[in-house]
Image (spheres, rainbow, N blue to C red):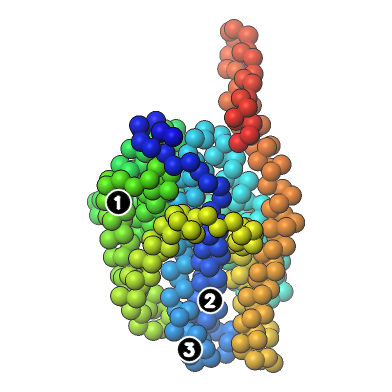
Amino acid sequence: MTSTDGVRQTPQRGRLAALDGLRLLAALAVAGFHFVGIDLDYWGVPSRMEFPTLNEVARYGYLGVELFFMISGFVILMSAYGRNLTSFVSSRVSRLFPAYWVAIILTFLLQRFWENGRQVPIFDALVNMTMIQGAFDIPNVQGAFWTLWIELKFYLVIGIFIMVGITRRRVIAFAILWPLVAQLARATGAPILSSLLNPTYASYFAGGMLLYLLYRHGHDLMTWLGIGLNWVLCVSQAARYAATTASEQTQNQLSPELAAVAVTAMFAVIYACSHGRLADVRWGWLTTAGALTYPLYLVHGQFGFFLIDVLQENLNSYVVLAAAVATSVLLAWCIHRFVERPWQRPLRSAIDRSLADLADVAPASAGPSPRPRRTRTLEESIR
């Protein structure tokens, strides 16, 4: 098969179940960082004292966020290829918002009677429902929600890319230039452009995009050079962050070298999940695990902290930790089963119809009769 660039295109082999499993590992790493890696007041003593051995590993769990961003670069480009803007918008909105709305409502209710939780005023919680609270410096209902604003800006960039037209050559050029232009925007004091292009994490998204090109089109020198560039930028960012911000958060001196090795492993594992034997894995439970990743990320913070706060005085700390993780996973499954699965497809269809109607509205001024509504093609209906 040949793409519009004249380059061989590898036939798609279905869902990458191993990549779904990797997403769950990233979510569990973040949960471990929050529960054990930082000095959480709810344990009564610093986490590094309560879990001296586990803390040695969990303190690097913040890198799960970086892994999320790399996987997003891969899978969001995959979902955007060959789609129009309407289809992309409806798929993203229907995927993100149902679970997010429920997580905010449940968290806000929890915070009404749990005094040690994050107390967010109701009007700030309402703004949180839009997922754009980061643009207005409004506190997040849960601390982990800060990454969603970064993801939304990436979707906006991809939406613009869809309107321009996605091709292999353009993806390579974009993934190489994006991190560089983002750094120039920050260095020259262009706040709006810098915020949109996100210089801190641009190389993670771009690296994931280029890894998807390898999966879709096969190996070529320019794609590998782009991956090499973004790997260097990611390693540099991870090493600096480990030595400064992450060390401050964990009250431990983290190793920049270990962070660099972990980021290198991320590139290697995502490549392995999309090539060779791992790419052919079809275990259904891995797909289910991937489906639980997003709701688990949304709920683990406040609900896990709540259980730790109320149980830690009367139970063994490892039992409490297991209960916090298990309850977070169970709540994530409930949201997936009773919110995402029933509502995602109807919401997506409703958004598709609404956007199609907007596209087909005739001008309000007097003139020729309105043009007939466009009939959706079979390809658009399937998407």
**Which residue occupies 53% across, 91% down?**
50
Question: Quadrant where the C terminus lies?
Answer: top right
Would you say 331 lies left or right of 224 here?
right
Q: Secondary structure at mark 3?
A: helix
Foreground label between 1 and 2: 1
Q: Is residue 341 above or below residue 169?
A: below
Image location (x, y in percent) of residue 266: 41, 64
Q: Is residue 182 above or below residue 358?
A: below
Question: Quadrant where the N terminus lies?
Answer: top left
Q: Secondary structure at mark 2?
A: helix
Residue for badge 3 = 53
Q: In the rendered structure, find residue 32 and report the number of the disc placed on it.
A: 2
Of mark 2 and mark 3, the one earlier in the sequence is 2
- Location of residue 326 by image quarter: bottom right
Image location (x, y in percent) of residue 148: 52, 56
Residue for badge 1 = 224
**Which residue occupies 69% across, 92% down?**
314
Residue toward you, 100 or 291? 291
Would you say 347 lies left or right of 239 here?
right
Distance Cα–Cα, label 3 vs label 1: 38 Å
Task: Name the residue type under label 2.
Answer: Gly
Q: In the rendered structure, find residue 26 and report the number of the disc placed on it.
A: none
Image location (x, y in percent) of residue 332: 67, 64
Task: Name the residue type under label 1.
Answer: Trp
Distance Cα–Cα, label 2 vs label 3: 13 Å
Q: Residues within 10 Å of mark 2 (few under 14, many from 20)?
A: many
Residue toward you, 119 or 277? 277
Residue contact between numbered discs 2 and 3, judged by CB atoms under 8 Å: no
Q: Secondary structure at mark 1?
A: helix
Q: Is residue 115 visible?
A: no
